[in-house]
Structures are given as structure tokens and as C-alpha cells.
Image (tube, grey):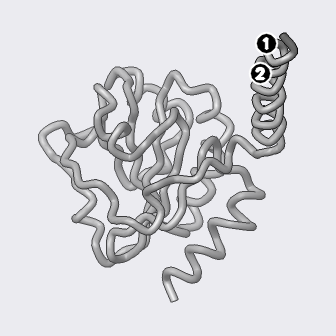
Amino acid sequence: MKLKYLVPLAIFAILCVFLAVGLTRDPRQVPSPFIGKPAPAFTLAKLHEPQASFGPEQMRGKVWLLNVWASWCVSCRIEHPVLNDMNRKGIVPIVGLNYKDARADATKWLQQHGDPYQFSVWDIDGKVGIDYGVYGAPETFVIDKQGIIRYKQIGPITPEALEKTILPLLAKLNA
């Protein structure tokens, strides 16, 4: 009879341990299986030039950022001034991946808030985002000269993340 109560209690205790461990982790530090692997290939139309297309192989030989953004993304507004500042300073080429957004909404948003991107590509159905393991916008990938993903920022790039993580990595990759 005691066993009847001990099994559910043991299962509950195990679940509590997993929950406690999970609560101690930073949700922005989700490990990505893509780190150290080639960036997934794609070809998408450019946002402002629908007749022109882009694929990551065109950036071979350069260290660059792929920034996933959308006009409907509230957090994108938080990181956008950081991206605009990076662009003004010429720190690194930034390619935008406009994610599940209407083309008109995306172009209007960039007109209102500034366009920090070398250009943006349009991922209307989110298939490229899925290939990159995107959880949601914004997310940013640092891609090296050989086309290997070296870092993934989940959520907005903050000045702190830029100074402590991204800039030192860019310096290392460009050395």
C-alpha cells in the first residue's frame, strides 16, 4: 500500500528537481546545434529589390551578421538602435532576414526606424528561419569567412552583449 503513494511522490520529486535546474538557466543561453557548423544554404529575394536574390555563399571571405527581424517584433525595436550604431561605425556587414512579415510592413518599418542592413532578404514563410533554428525574432548569427556559424544571440543585441561577446568575437574572426 505504501508503494502506491511512494511512486507518484518519487516522480513528483524528480520533476521538481528538473524544474529547479531549468529555472536557474538563462533562457537567452539556449545552446545551438549550429555553432561550429556551416550556415544553412538558401536563396531568397532581397526585400528592396525583389528581382535580386541572395545566398550566404555570396558572403564567403567576410565575417558578417545575419540578423532575424520583423516589423511586428517588439524586441526588434530594442536592438535596432544598436544595429544602426554598428552600421554607422562600419563594424561588420549586417544582412537582415525579414521573418514572416509583409513586404510593405517591413519596408515601412525600416523607413521609420532606419536601415542598418547592407540589405535584407524576405523570408515570408519562415522556412529559412526554421533551417537556422530560429525561435523567434530577433536573433543574430555571427558567421565567419568560411561560412561557419560561430555565435547565436537569442533576443535583442544589447550594448552589453555587443561589448562583452560580439565585438571580441568579431575581432578574433577578423584577425
Residue 10 against residue 161 in the figure, above or below: above
Residues 21 and 50: in front is 21
**Residue sitting at 84 percent across and 20 percent down?**
6
Residue 70's x, y, as percent? 47, 30
> Which residue in the structure is indicated by mark 1?
4
Q: Is the C-beta separation of discs 2 and 1 under 8 Å?
A: yes
**Residue sitting at 12 percent across and 40 percent down?**
51
Residue 25's x, y, as percent? 77, 45
Q: Quadrant of the N terminus?
A: top right
Question: In this rendering, would 26 be left or right of 42?
Answer: right
Residue 18's x, y, as percent? 76, 36
Disc ID at residue 7? 2
Question: In this rendering, would 93 be left or right of 54?
Answer: right
Residue 69's x, y, as percent? 48, 37
Residues 135 and 3: in front is 3
**Residue sitting at 76 percent across and 29 percent down?**
15
* SS class, disc 1: helix
